[in-house]
């Protein structure tokens, strides 16, 4: 098996306990991962979904086992619960089998840049529209996720690479993009006010590398819709990776250069299936 080396890795929005979770791709990533620090940036286990309908697969257990194995090997693992695994927030400050639970964290990059790390649900407006609009939006998202699952199953049978239908739809809906941009700017503004160089989060299922004023906004995406992780190399450069049949670099940021991950890249990366230029991040036999 090949190994993937980096200094730090950030994953969120895995949603174990739901049929939308792409556990097989995440398992492949974790089994190849060799890093010093791993941040689980919320919504790893979807406790909300499990409370509504118990649903669990052996490969979901395997994901948790792989995280525990990384902790046993000496990886510093920090679990920051999100809104879907919020009950775990009551356990902040505790350590379970080498996994530290925290409400948020400060990550200092190899290049000295300071990042606040949080799930990101705190940047959602308290009241977005009326109740019926929220229910309609949730129902629409469930329908799109169902379509994504069906399309993925068909493409797997045809030996075709993963295609993130839901991300493609988000990338072509003006209101969705407007919401995403406003969310990113709220997160960046908060980081700036708190004196950080950047903010790392998840929550909105839209991976991103974007410079906003003096702040580097980094969203590690999800493992439901687009299968992305954020990784830091040993120089402090940050890279957003799509990971399915083949790793694809979507955006990169170092002190010298920021290559943003536009919506088009997020939507079309699995179609391109090009081998990324990983720079100091490297695959070794």
Image (cartoon, grey):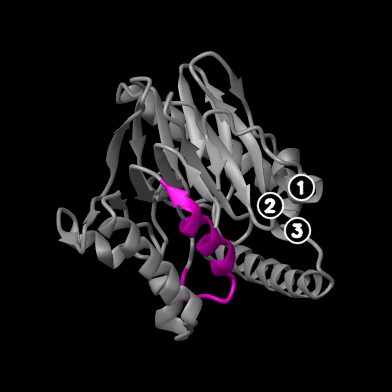
The foreground one among 233 and 173 is: 233
Q: Nearer the viewer, mark 3 or mark 1?
A: 1
Q: In the picture provided, is 234 more to the left or to the right than 20?
A: left
Is 235 placed above or below 22 here? above
Could you give the CA–CA distance between mark 1 and mark 2, rounded to whole angstroms? 6 Å
Residue 72 in the image, given as x and y percentages of width and height? 26, 59
Q: Residue furthest left?
A: 94
Badge 1 or badge 2: first in the primary sequence: 2
22 in magenta: yes
Q: What number is the disc on residue 246?
A: 2
Q: Is residue 195 left or right of residue 62?
A: left
Residue 163's disc is 3
Q: Give the extent of the magenta segment.
A: 16-34
225, above or below 219, in the image:
below
Quick one: which residue is furthest to the top in this view?
256
Q: Is residue 15 above or below residue 197?
A: below
Find out whether residue 210 is within the magenta segment.
no
User: Foreground residue, 178 or 104?
Assistant: 104
Q: Tags 1 and 2 in contact by the CB under 8 Å rule?
A: yes
30 versus 253 height, above or below? below
Q: Earlier in the sequence, mark 3 or mark 1?
A: 3
- Mark 2 burial class by Cα count in 10 Å: few <14, some 14-19, many 20+: some
Q: CA separation, marks 2 and 3?
A: 12 Å
Quick one: SS at disc 3? loop
Tell us which disc is closer to us: 2 or 3. 2
Residue at x 68% of width, y 52% of height: 246
Residue drawn 73% across the image and 39% down it:
265
Mark 2 or mark 3: which comes first in sequence?
Answer: 3
Q: Quickly name the residue at label 1.
A: 273
């Amino acid at each position: 098996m090949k190994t993937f080396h980096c200094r730090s890795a950030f994953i969120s929005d895995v949603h174990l306990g739901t049929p939308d979770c792409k556990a097989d791709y995440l398992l492949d990533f974790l089994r190849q991962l060799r890093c010093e620090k791993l941040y689980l940036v919320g919504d790893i286990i979807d406790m909300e979904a499990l409370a509504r309908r118990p649903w669990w697969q052996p490969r979901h257990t395997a994901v948790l086992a792989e995280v525990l194995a990384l902790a046993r090997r000496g990886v510093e693992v920090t679990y920051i619960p999100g809104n879907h695994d919020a009950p775990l927030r009551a356990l902040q400050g505790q350590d379970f089998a080498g996994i530290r639970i925290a409400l948020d964290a400060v990550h200092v990059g190899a290049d000295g840049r300071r990042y606040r790390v949080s799930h990101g649900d705190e940047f959602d407006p308290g009241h977005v529209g009326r109740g019926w609009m929220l229910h309609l939006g949730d129902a629409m998202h469930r329908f799109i996720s169902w379509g994504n699952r069906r399309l993925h199953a068909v493409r797997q049978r045809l030996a075709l690479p993963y295609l993130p239908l839901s991300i493609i739809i988000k990338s072509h809906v003006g209101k969705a993009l407007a919401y995403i941009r406003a969310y990113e700017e709220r997160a960046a503004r908060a980081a700036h006010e708190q004196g950080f160089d950047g903010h790392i989060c998840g929550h909105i299922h839209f991976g991103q590398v974007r410079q906003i004023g003096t702040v580097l906004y980094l969203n590690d995406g999800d493992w439901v819709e687009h299968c992305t992780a954020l990784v830091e190399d040993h120089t402090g450069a940050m890279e957003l990776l799509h990971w399915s049949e083949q790793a694809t670099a979507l955006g990169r940021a170092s002190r010298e250069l920021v290559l943003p991950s536009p919506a088009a890249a997020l939507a079309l990366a699995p179609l391109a299936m090009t081998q990324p230029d990983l720079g100091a991040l490297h695959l070794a036999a």
